[in-house]
Amino acid sequence: MYSAETWTLTGTQEQRLDAFDSKCQRRILGIRWYDHVSNTTLRSITNQPPLSHKIRSARLRLFGHLARAEPPPEPVVLLREPNPTTWSRPRGRPRRTWLDQLANDLQQTAGLSIAAAWEATRDRSTWRSETIVKKL
C-alpha cells in the first residue's frame, strides 16, 4: 500500500481490493470456502477494516497534513487554484482527480465539502477525531 493515499479508485476497484484483502485474510486464518464464513464475520474475527477504508483514512490524513503545512508547498497552492482559462480538456470523460476522490471521501465520512475541510484541518485533534479515527 505504498503511496495508496494518492490513488484515485473507482467503486469497482475498491470492491476488488476489498475482495483481495478478504481472500488474503481467509488464507492466513486457514478458512476454506466450504466453511461458509461471511465477510462481516471475518472482519469481526480479525478486527480489521476493509482495505478501502484504510486507503480512505490515509488519504484524509495526507490531506490534513498538506492543508496544515506552513508555508504551503507548491502542489498545495496548485490544488487550490482554478484551472487556467487557456487550458483545454481532452476528448472523452474527464479523469477522476485526487480532489474529486477527496471530496467523495469527505462527504462519506464527515459530511464536509472541500472548502469546509480546508478550514477544519486547522485544528488537528478535531480533524483527526472527526474524519480519520471515526469508524469508517
Image (cartoon, grey):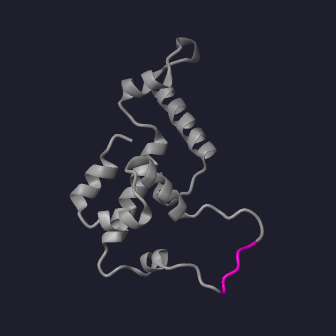
Q: Is residue 6 above or below residue 90?
A: above
Q: Residue furthest bottom?
A: 86
The front one of 116 and 106 is 116
Question: In this image, 125 relative to 16: left or right?
Answer: left
- Front-lying residue, 17 or 83: 83
Q: Position of residue 68 (x, y in %)?
A: 30, 70
Above or below: residue 42 compared with residue 76: above
**Residue at 31% in and 82% down:** 71
Looking at the image, residue 56 sits to the left or right of residue 96; the answer is: left
- Residue 78: % across, % down: 48, 79
Rendering quarter of residue 47: top left
Q: Position of residue 121 (x, y in %)?
A: 30, 64
Residue at the (23%, 63%) spot, across then down = 123
Asked if residue 90 lies left or right of residue 44, the reply is right
Q: Which of 112 and 26 is in front in this view?
A: 112
Does 75 appear in magenta? no
Q: Residue furthest right?
A: 91
Q: Which residue is drawn at 37% across and 64% down?
A: 116
Figure disc tally: 0
Residue 84 shows in the view? yes
Q: What stretch is highlighted in magenta?
A: 86-90
Q: Which residue is drawn at 41% across and 67% down?
A: 115
Tell me if residue 3 can be seen.
Answer: no
Q: Quadrant of the C terminus?
A: top left
Q: Nearer the viewer, residue 104 or 74?
A: 104
Give left or right: position of 19 versus 58. Answer: right
Q: Main secondary structure of the magenta part?
A: loop
- Corner quadrant of residue 63: bottom left
Measured from the top left, where is residue 64 in percent x and y?
A: 34, 63
